[in-house]
Amino acid sequence: MINECVLLKDGRTIIFQDITNSVSADIYQDDLHYQVCESLADKYEIEKSLHQVLVNLLALKSFRAREITALCWYIENYKSNIVEVFAYDDVCLSLKSQGLGDIIVNQLGIAKVPLVTRRQTITVLVKAILHKLFRLFSRKPKVGVDVVRGWVEVTESMYPDIIRTAEVRVYPFPYGIIRQINFINKCRKLGVLWSFDGLPYSFKDIFRIVFAPNMFEIAITQLEYNAFSLYSREVMGWNPNTIYTSDEYEVGSVAFYSILTHNNIKSVNTAHGIGWYCPYVAYSEFRVFNHGQGDFYRKRNSSMALVLRERNNAILPIDYDSCRNATHVAFVLIHQNFDDFQMPAERSAQLRLGNLIKEASAKCKVPYFVKLHPNTRPSDVTAVSRSLWGDPLIEWKTLTGYRPIFILINSTTFFELRDIAPVLVYSAPSFKPELYFESGYNTVCLESCKEILVSLLNLDMWEKSFQNQCSANIFNSSDSAHPLHCALS
């Protein structure tokens, strides 16, 4: 059996999986990926509302869609080195839809690779069961009160004033149970009106997935669409004026907010991160990090109002003045849990950066910390920090007394750090920091990492780097609280 692969002019062959593993997930944040997902969804004759949910599902959950996108990216960038491609029919259709039909393709037959795997369906089933459990402990909502859909402490930082007068409905968040417990305790401490809640996933739809012989993508699409549609009717009975949320990663949420909007219930979504998630959303208002993110969501949702976020996800206990005047320098790598989201290229880059920072740290006798992602399990703290060769950093206040130099790979934390100290953003082929940060950021690659870190030990160079990223700080811009005029024009 011939594997799907690319034959190069030097005689080598590269299988699709190796291409996928070598490229950054940033290419799945570009129009190329969403166009591939549209072409894959087009083969199903389903109504528009289901089609939108299916495209969202493929964009976020389909390894096959990512594999085809990675191939298209590879062909676009290395076409002159390619002799021919061996692939199934779904690849051929996608290549034609991307204007790459002139590449020689040896078709292997009808696609045998599922768009959504059995393993991914298990994740969906666990999610559905957790939602049903949360509903068992749900309290009857108060009628006529605004609603905040919440998960963890970030919800409170997004809507600090609103949660004190609205009702907070708390939904399952399996990636960070401790964070959710802390959020619930904070709600109790503040005297916030809150309750557990979940979507009404039906056992019929769950069983349809369990016993589906194939085409899991359609069964999951139906399950998500039905659950969100049913839930919208429940919410309408509460008679809220506005729903506040942060769920642009929920593939079925487009159905939920479409129905609410049609029934004159306003919805406000605050981007929970810098990434681009579901291409189809239906909020009344979307609060985004920057113009690029706004333009992406506006492309398929032209009636939605866009607003630049007025604040970050967190306010840190360190600031520029205290850092600048500190006597000791520290290197700080912002860790991300790439393993949990199957991002091998980012994981590899993070490991290599960690090793280079360790070498610079040893050479210059400078402390090196790894700021662990908030979803890191307590039992994994030591292992994660050791794998990146640094000392674990849990609380930001630990950096008090240090003049930090931050290094990260496309993290929302950038926006919280850029007013404090220099932030070096990783850049490499297929890594696209410009998608998220637009301008005013300093880049670093593997080849230059140690040299740049050493140069920033000098206070003048540290300040120069800091001023460069502040020159385009969107949170200090005069129109940060106003609609995105460029997106609305």
Image: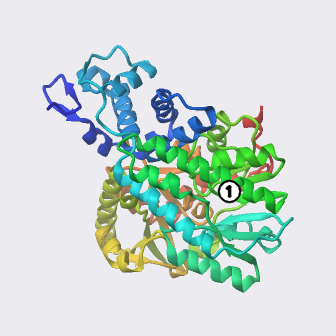
Quadrant position of residue 95: top left
Quadrant containing the N terminus in the rendered view: top left
The residue sitting at 19% across, 26% down in the picture is: 7
Asked whether residue 408 appears in the rendered view, the answer is: no
Residue 289 as seen in the image, left or right of residue 167: left
- What amino acid type should be assigned to the residue bearing mark 1? Tyr
- The answer to whether residue 36 is above or below residue 254 is above
Expressed as whole percent of the image width and height from the top left, the position of residue 220 reads 49, 47
- The answer to whether residue 435 is above or below residue 454 is above
Residue 383 as seen in the image, left or right of residue 436: left
The residue sitting at 49% across, 62% down in the picture is: 127
Residue 304 as seen in the image, left or right of residue 409: right
The residue sitting at 30% across, 55% down in the picture is: 348
Expressed as whole percent of the image width and height from the top left, the position of residue 391 reads 37, 77
Find the residue positioned furthest to the front: 204
Task: Identify residue for label 1.
Answer: 231
Expressed as whole percent of the image width and height from the top left, the position of residue 188 reads 70, 84
Residue 90 as seen in the image, left or right of residue 459: left
